[in-house]
Image (cartoon, grey):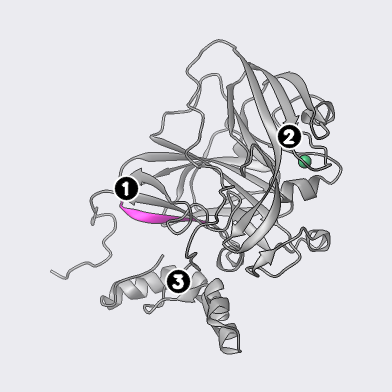
Amino acid sequence: MTDERTSEATSRSTRRSFLKGLGSAAAAGSAISVAGLSAADADARGTETETGGWAAPSLSRAPRTRIAADPTDVPPPVDWSAPRSHEITLSCKEVTAEIEPGVTFPYMTFDGQVPGPMIRVRQGDTVQFTLENVSAGAMPHNIDFHAVYGTGGGAEATLAPPGQSQTISFRAEYPGAFIYHCAVPNVDYHIASGMFGLIFVEPKDGLPAVDREFYLGQHEVYTNKPTGTDGEHAFDFDAMTREDPTYVLLNGQKQALTESGFGAMEIEVDETARVFFANGGPNLTSSFHPIGNVWTKAWREGAVASRPDRYVQTMTTGPGSCGVFEMDCPVPETIKLVDHALSRVVRKGFLGEIKVTGDPRPEIFDPAPTST
Ligand SMILES: [Cu+2]
């Protein structure tokens, strides 16, 4: 989002207008910094650029341990036309890691990543699913698949104390993108600690082919210290009860999927992208928006048996739900993926980036037009 140009008053003005909301949010941060907080505090809140644009607070380095799921780790599209059986295992792992450099948090995960691995099957396929609890702690875990007919979506039958595993079998009867999550009595605590993911039950006729697919998950974390405070953060049940998160994150860590984190997603001009998006919550609704782009097709709630909405700016996705969103990429740019409840971006760590590379298309977007 950094605007590096210092001339071209016209485009500057356009950009300022485009970023008006973000600039205002950053300006609020600046005002606070004048009141006596350190430069680091001000940086953590985002800054206005020389040209009036807005730059996300940046990380000097990525967290040391990666919890963030690789957004390109998407199972390939279904290429079979008769029902199949799958054996799938997920492991419950408790991992202490950094939310951002210097801030550690005791995550609970499926397979050591947030969101947990994406599962992809075809409608009518049967899954023999095993949940193994390999955590060293004392907590049992289980799993509730929203793609499953059956008590608790499989939660009761998969309850596994540490060192044990449980197996269920289910047939994927209906198509769509569905969340899965741990569903023990403190379900909100376990989801906020990272225990959610997405299963995509592909319709029998599949979806249209796209060039790239990405897998993303949003959730919020409640800790006992202010956002960005160095040291060990513990879980805070009171903050969760107030629905007042310390962090709101894309793929589990602050700005994980950006240039300054573990790297941006990449795509070339004229390619199409599909995003599988899960909002674990446990409490906040997402207003998921690609800055500088639009969701060309969007299946709300991941309901791919329905017709998609077209050219949608912001896809509202409630906690415990998913979405399947597509975009065209006609110009080179860096697309910022945000929850448009923007304080979550400016102050609570949410941000992803998709770098679109290729030749400029000035007839579509010209950042510095010359007069003729
Ligand atoms: Cu759990």
Q: Which amino acid is tagged 2?
A: Val
Q: Measured from the top left, where is residue 331 in percent x and y?
A: 31, 51
Mark 2 vs mark 3: give the one in front. Answer: 2
Q: In the image shown, does 68 or 34 lie closer to the viewer?
A: 68
Q: Residue at x 48, y 25 (%)?
A: 77
Q: Is residue 305 visible?
A: no
Label 2 packing within 10 angstroms: few (<14), some (14-19), many (20+) = many
Q: In the image shown, does 253 or 125 lie closer to the viewer?
A: 253
Q: Which residues are magenta?
A: 331-337
In what element is the residue under mark 1?
loop
Q: Residue at x 63, y 36 (%)?
A: 198
Q: Tell me which corner region of the image, top left, top right, bottom left or bottom right, holds residue 112.
A: top right
Rounded to the nearest angstrom, the CA distance separating label 2 from label 3 is 44 Å
From the image, which quarter does the N terminus lie in?
A: bottom left
Residue 152 part of the magenta segment: no
Label 1 packing within 10 angstroms: few (<14), some (14-19), many (20+) = many
Spot the residue most to the top.
82
Mark 1 vs mark 2: give the one in front. Answer: 2
Residue 330 disc label:
1
Residue named by callout 3: 54
Q: Residue at x 48, y 56 (%)?
A: 261
